[in-house]
Image (cartoon, grey):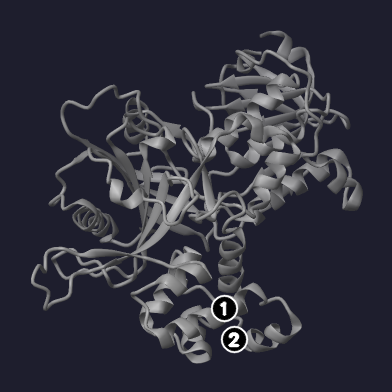
Amino acid sequence: MESLSDTDWDVVISGTGLQQSLFALALSRSGKNILHVDPEGYYGEHEAAFSLQEADAWAEKHASPDAPGLFRAAKVTKADGLPSPRGYSLALAPQLIHARSELLNKLVSSKAFRQIEFQAVGSFFIFQPAAADSEDAATPTLARIPSTREDVFLSTAIPVRAKRSLMKFLKFVLDHESETQVEVWKPHASKPLAEFLGSEFKLDATLQSYIVTLTLSLDGNIPVEDGLVAISRHLSSMGVFGAGFAAIYPKWGGLSEVCQVGCRAAAVGGAVYMLGTGITKVAKRADEAVKLDISLSNDMVVRAKTLFRGSEISPADGVMLARTTAVIETALPNLFETVMDGSPTPSAVVVAFPAGSVTDGHGSVSQYPIYAMVHSSDTGECPVGQCIIYLSTISTPSSQILLDTALSSLLRAASGVQENRGVAFKLQYQQKGARTPSLIVDDGIVTFGAPALDLAFRDDMLQPVLEAWQRFAGQSGQEADAQYLVFEDREVVDDDDVFNA
């Protein structure tokens, strides 16, 4: 370990979050001296995945409502008799990945995709409270959202006239970048998408909620321009990897797996990894070539040309989500049915609770949409016979209670389970994040901004990684594009224990 202090490091990377790990992947064939540290004892940082024991320890660390960093107000409740607490992998910030995502392109061009197993994300559902005049007013329902022309054509829940309007909109979206269509939506670019759907396509409130749900908008008020991009991405992703689904999810813990693959590639390339080691101080040196003295939490000081790190500060215009992760003692098989011949059995589905559709019984009504990502045991995140439900909404004083209500309502709609029976483990917390990704450069110190908290991975999350790599490589334009995360297959190597380099 003493030799670390004697090495002039080209790069020190702090944190093993997604952006730092993809940056490490980009540098994995550079031949440079790279030291990658993380103050935690696990990979993934804000995108980490935990066993139940690890989730317990993490919640205790972040229990205070005023905890520093991006996580706070964490709390665990659990039932007795959970089998094998290590048989779980709970993601802190699960995100689905659309088939047309640039992230997948980069995982393919870098050959990193060979080490990740992906699962199909199936249907999107809308929660519908039971009608007041229903004979069984206690039983709400889940309506599947049609997201292709074939879906719309076959639907028996949509009137014929409304089908024609919806078909017209779907055709419009797929051609929305053409000059003719831009003239239609551009004057409304900053207006709410729902308003545009009503005025231009005569879609009623139900169909508006279907369309807005497919955007996964956190506040339900996505503007027209952003909404058209999101819907177009969803529609164009449908069928790319197989019939009946538009998005995928990495098995065994979501983006945490991508983080580990990036770090593993860097370790195979010669990078040195030190978990449980943070940075306590950074001092500028007079040396023009080696600019930084970096003090580590193990009392070691290393020299480096550049430090790349993640941020623990959310911007003033950021967003805070309330999250609940629940282990359910039933598989909810009705949610994971195939929707067409030839389509794979999905491992994840999305259930949306539109704003105003959830009440807590004390007068509080959901101000923002609530989203539930339901994962089967096929994701590797829980044992067979169980499932994981990840709920999230923009944080308000009543948001955690509303999430509990949404969870109970979802269980009733999907399986008839009453109240919170069947909830074996529940992790609640708040997470702060950014609305847009960023990169801050300050004389040898490069900081990736707080993660954007969208429920679907955004392509612009890769932009800071590209900018960081361009700064390191001294390249830009076509030259950079030809080399950035574009690798040939390595010769066969035994990469067991590469993290212990």
The label on residue 338 is none
Residue 484's x, y, as percent? 81, 42
| Relative horizontal placement of residue 37, taking residue 52 as reference (left or right) | right
| Relative horizontal placement of residue 274, taking residue 353 as reference (left or right) | right
Q: Earlier in the sequence, mark 1 or mark 2?
A: 2
| Label 1 neighbour load within 10 Å: few <14, some 14-19, many 20+ | many
Residue 232 vertical position relative to residue 242 in the rendered view, above or below: below
Residue 121's x, y, as percent? 47, 50
**Mark 1: amino acid:** Val
Instruction: Choose between 248 and 189: the one closer to the eye.
Output: 248
Q: Please, what secondary structure does the residue beneath circle 1 have?
A: helix
**Mark 2: amino acid:** His
Taking the spot 36% from the left edge, 41% from the top edge, the residue there is: 376
Residue 447 picture quarter: top right
Taking the spot 12% from the left edge, 74% from the top edge, the residue there is: 134
Q: Quickly name the residue at label 1.
A: 224
Indicate the quadrant containing the N terminus: top left, top right, bottom left or bottom right: top right
Residue 416's x, y, as percent? 16, 53
Residue 128's x, y, as percent? 26, 69
Residue 294 can be seen, yes or no: no
Q: Quickly name the residue at label 2.
A: 188
Q: Please, what secondary structure does the residue beneath circle 2 have?
A: helix
Residue 366 picture quarter: bottom left
Residue 409 can be seen, yes or no: yes
Tags 1 and 2 touching, CB below 8 Å: yes
Residue 438 vertical position relative to residue 26 in the rendered view, above or below: below
Indicate the quadrant containing the C terminus: top left, top right, bottom left or bottom right: top right
